[in-house]
Amino acid sequence: QVQLVESGGGLVQSGGSLRLSCAASKTISSTYTMAWYRQVPGKQRELVAVRTGGGNTNYADSVKGRFTISRDNAKNTVYLQMNSLKPEDTAVYYCNARSTMSVLEYWGQGTQVTVSS
């Protein structure tokens, strides 16, 4: 069992930056894909950014060029650097770890990001 704990959310003005962190309770192997999702009330959770164990990344069109996902294996932590934030980025952001070798999947508890106009 792996616990994922997000941090770094908060209130920021439009155009500002935040860095979210997702700390894992133990080492996550490279067979896991790490991702950030976000959700607003009344809408489905949407994929924001994903990073494979091999280092490949992909982003939702709405955040390309503004968000960067990265991973520090020594700290068992995944980050989401968010720049040029917009009010429409307001959501609860969730960290996800999904095995590519089994059905195992883990979620964090979420961290609120609010961008004021």
Image (cartoon, helix red, strand yellow):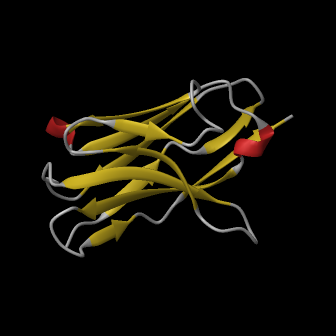
* Rendered image quadrant of residue 77: top left
Q: Nearer the viewer, residue 51 or 15?
A: 51
**At which x and y percent is residue 90?**
72, 48
Q: Nearer the viewer, residue 97 or 62?
A: 62
Residue ID at (32%, 51%): 34
**At which x and y percent is residue 74?**
14, 36
Residue ID at (76%, 72%): 42
**At which x and y percent is residue 18?**
57, 32
User: Which residue sits furthest right?
Assistant: 117
Q: Is residue 109 left or right of residue 87?
A: left
Residue 55 against residue 34 in the figure, above or below: above
* Rendered image quadrant of residue 102: bottom left
Which quadrant is the C terminus positioned in?
top right
Residue ID at (77%, 44%): 88
Residue 105 against residue 97 in the figure, above or below: below
Total numbered labels placed on residues in the image? 0
**At which x and y percent is residue 115?**
75, 39
Which quadrant is the N terminus positioned in?
bottom left
Residue ID at (37%, 36%): 57
Q: Is residue 49 left or right of residue 30?
A: right
Q: Is residue 71 left or right of residue 116?
A: left
